[in-house]
Image (cartoon, grey):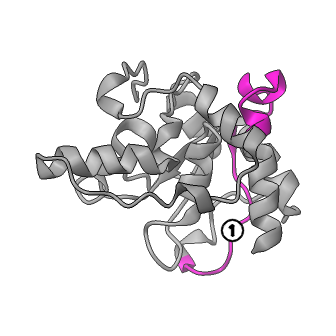
Amino acid sequence: MRNQYVAYKEVFFASLTLPEVTNKTESLIFAGSLGRTNLGRENIAKSPKLIPKDYYSRMAKSKYILSPNGDRPECYRHYEAIGLGTMPITELDPMLFHHFEQNVIYNTSDWNVTMLEIRLNPEPVVNRNLIREAYWMEWANEQAGLSLNWNDYSNGNGLSDEETALLASMAWPIHSNSIVTANKQR
């Protein structure tokens, strides 16, 4: 798990600045490897198993990733993809998982990559803030209708001073209400 974290962190920070990643040059849809946690995954396109850094790099350079249910509907892959600016294609129920807003494709049961490529927006917009603690603190405040009292654990986040400064310099809006999304599902 530590190796995965290190690989994700490296690719995440590269995805903020490297043109080949920010321009999403790899593919429209990345399948990724899929475990055998759900029989429904048997007929879904898969990629060969990759080492974590290669897996996250391919994900970061793609616009979408297949993310079917495993042993539960929600999984790390959704958040990993969103953090890398890649939109997960899921089986999630939009009523139960409305907190993702327009940052995932909901209720997919057709995993035919050729058909998905025809139907999907070729330029999806993903709010990468969904992986940031500040986003969820503000979201919870909005849902509660008041400012909640939050503890500050940010000094233990494992980031270097340079990485913290890079994140602080990004011009990302904190909450999705301040984002105008151009993402329209066809």
Question: In which quarter of the view is residue 178 placed?
Answer: top left
135 and 179: which is toward the camera: 135
Q: Position of residue 43 (x, y in %)?
A: 63, 66
- Quarter holding residue 45: bottom right
Which quadrant of the rendered structure holds the N terminus?
A: bottom right
| Residue that badge 1 annotates | 34
- The x, y position of residue 170, in whole percent, is 60, 26
Query: Is residue 24 inside the magenta stretch?
Result: yes
Q: Position of residue 64 (x, y in %)?
A: 61, 40
Residue depicted at 61% across the width and 39% down the height: 86
- Using the image, determine if residue 73 lies above or below residue 167: below
Q: Is residue 26 visible?
A: yes
| Mark 1 neighbour class, 10 Å CA radius: few under 14, some 14 to 19, many 20 or more | some
Find the magenta span and give its range.
13-39
Give x and y (percent) for residue 85.
61, 36
Q: Nearer the viewer, residue 167 or 20?
A: 167
Q: Is residue 174 left or right of residue 41?
A: left
Task: Identify residue type, mark 1.
Answer: Leu
Q: Where's the C terminus, which quadrant?
A: top left
Question: Which residue of the protein is positioned furthest toward the left in this rendering?
Answer: 145
Identify which residue is drawn at 68% across, 75% down: 35
Query: Is 77 one of the magenta-colored residues?
Result: no
Q: Is residue 163 positioned above or below 99 on the image?
A: above
Residue 161, compared with residue 71, is above or below; it is above
Image point (19%, 43%), residue name: 142
The quadrant holding residue 93 is bottom left
Residue 61 in sight in this render: no
Question: Which is nearer the eye, 177 or 24?
Answer: 177
**Circle 1: element type:** loop
